[in-house]
Amino acid sequence: EILGPNEENTGNMEQIQEEGPSINMTDFKNLLSENVENKYFPAGHVIYKEGATGNSMYFLESGSVEVITEGTRAVRSAGDFFGEGALLNENKAR
């Protein structure tokens, strides 16, 4: 359902509350900043291979990275992220 600028979607609030705890943006930012670690990878370095398991994702502060998934090539650059599949998949596969 797409809502207009003056409409509210209040019908899903009960469902959201039943699904589990929520977190406000301040707590989310604090949690994120406490768990972020700066890493430097030289040009040509393979960060991980498709199908590998992991427990982290990457945010690009500068430079770029080539992401190849199922034969499709994409370039990510400063401000982008990748590797989130390891956090979203139960088997932690990328």
Image: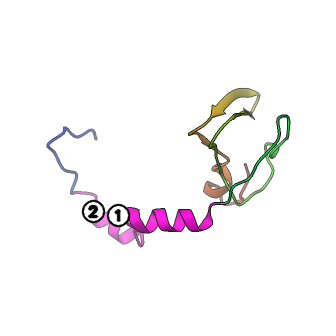
Instruction: Give the number of the disc on residue 5.
Output: none
Report which quarter residue 90 is drawn in.
bottom right
Side (left or right) of 44 relative to 22: right
Q: Does the CB distance between marks 2 and 1 fall below 8 Å?
A: yes
Side (left or right) of 77 relative to 31: right
Residue picked out by circle 1: 16
- Please state the extent of the stretch shown in magenta in the rendering: 11-36
Point out residue 71 in the picture as x, y percentages from the top left corner.
77, 28
**In front here: 18 or 6?**
6
Specify the quadrant that holds the N terminus: top left
Q: Secondary structure at mark 2?
A: helix
Point out residue 77 in the picture as x, y percentages from the top left corner.
63, 33
Q: Secondary structure at mark 1?
A: helix
Report which quarter residue 32 is drawn in.
bottom right
Residue picked out by circle 2: 13
Residue at horizontal 66 percent and vertical 52 percent from the top? 57
